[in-house]
Amino acid sequence: MNDLRSIWMAALAGVAAFVAAFVFVLLQGPSQRPAPAGHQAGMDKDKSPAAPKSSARVSEPTTLHYYRVRVALDGTLQAGKRTFHLYGAEIPGREYTCTYRNGQRWACGLRSYVALLNVIGTDPIECGPRNALKPDVVICHRDNIDLSEWMLKNGWARLANGVADERYVKAAKAASDAKIGMWTEEPLPQQNATAQ
């Protein structure tokens, strides 16, 4: 009985040693494994040196789909834990006020906030960074509508500093020239609440 137990213990110890050695070999990185016979490390079949790998590679900007986008009080977009700024458009916070030519103040920030909410609606949007080095500054589209361009064209955003993209410059100028959105100079006439 003791002999049988000793044989089983020895067999289990052998299996454990084999498994440990196998796991150790699997966990070794490729650079720690010996090169196959007849090959030198870093050389291919015709003995030319391997191309150097860049350690500071910048990935290409990626467009992502977002299905539940929230407009924050400061005019940024939030999807899950991510916060985005629309490229090209400086969107006022919800508490920002504008002044008519007659000196009366009005809640243009709130109107801008509502305009952005309405243009996004409940549809998914596609967003991608314009520059891989600034992943939180994005260009977003709902269907074929560029959200930044739409906000600028309708007067609910200002052209962001340093932006020279022609379509954004034109959209901002068109709204300013037409005195619409934040650029309006006169209070809008009160609309009948029952009007359709």
Image (cartoon, rainbow, N blue to C red):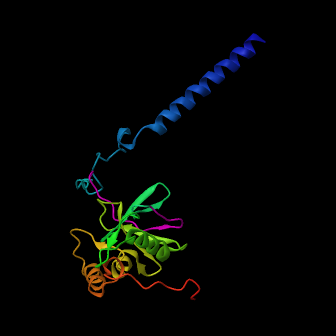
Q: Nearer the viewer, residue 98 or 72?
A: 98
Image quadrant holding the C terminus, namely bottom right
Is residue 71 rendered magenta in the image?
Answer: yes
Give the image quarter of residue 75: bottom left
How far across and how far down the image is residue 126, in percent?
A: 45, 71
Q: How many marks?
A: 0
Q: Position of residue 94 (x, y in %)?
A: 41, 64
Residue 44 to residue 35: above or below = below
179, 116: nearer the viewer = 179
Residue 79 vs residue 102, the one in the foreground: 102
Q: Residue 188 magenta-drawn?
A: no
Q: State which quadrant residue 161 falls in.
A: bottom left
**Residue found 52% across the figure and 71% down from its top:** 124
Decide whether the magenta segment is chiefly helix, strand or loop.
loop
Residue 14 locus on image (x, y percent): 60, 24
Q: In front here: 188 or 119?
A: 188
Farthest residue toward the top? Answer: 2
Q: Is residue 85 above or below residue 100?
A: above
Q: Quadrant of the N terminus?
A: top right
**Magenta segment boundaries in residue numbering:** 55-72
Residue 190 horizontal/vertical position (percent): 47, 83
> Which of the 4 image quarters holds residue 184?
bottom left
Tell me which residue sits at (21%, 75%) in the image. Answer: 164
